[in-house]
Amino acid sequence: MTGTEPMLYEIRVGGLLDDCWSSWFDGFTVTGGDAESVLRGPVVDQAALHGVLARIRDLGLPLVSVRIIARRTDLVARIDIDEREDLS
């Protein structure tokens, strides 16, 4: 990651977490499924990403996957386009 533009990450972990963990994961949304939980949120740099991964480690949850979904500005642009389409 370069620059100051946050990237939107999706992190999958084994185990069940509910949305009450969102505040502990610094604003990530947390959704639980059958055997995995998904965390989604902005990450500003590698140090912040390692901080989130350290929290996952501290909970003893197995890491399933980590992927970049979008740059934060890409996401905002898509939301803006969707809102305009709803208005027509």
Image: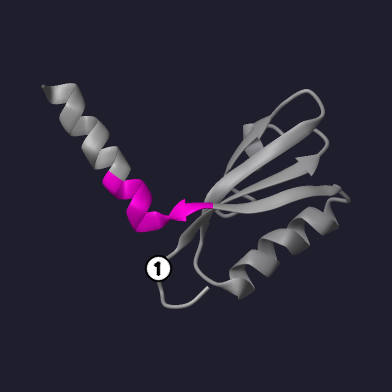
Q: Position of residue 63 (x, y in %)?
A: 81, 50
Relative height, residue 33 to residue 1 (above, below): above
Callout 1 secondary element: loop
Would residue 80 appear left or right of 8 to someone viewing this image?
left
Q: How many numbered callouts?
A: 1
Stretch of the chain drawn in magenta: 69-77
Would residue 37 appear left or right of 19 to someone viewing this image?
right
Relative height, residue 88 to residue 22 (above, below): above
Write the residue at 37% across / 47% down: 75
Write the residue at 60% across / 68% down: 48
Query: Label 1: few (<14), some or many (≥20) within 10 Å?
Result: some
Give the overall secondary structure of the magenta segment: helix
Q: Position of residue 82 (x, y in %)?
A: 26, 32
Q: Position of residue 74 (x, y in %)?
A: 35, 52
The answer to whether one can see residue 22 in this image is no
Q: Which residue has dot 1 on it? A: 5
The answer to whether one can see residue 64 in this image is yes
Relative height, residue 53 to residue 40 (above, below): below
Quadrant where the C terminus is found in the figure: top left
Residue 22, quarter of picture: top right
- Is residue 75 part of the magenta span, yes or no? yes
- Is residue 38 part of the magenta span, yes or no? no
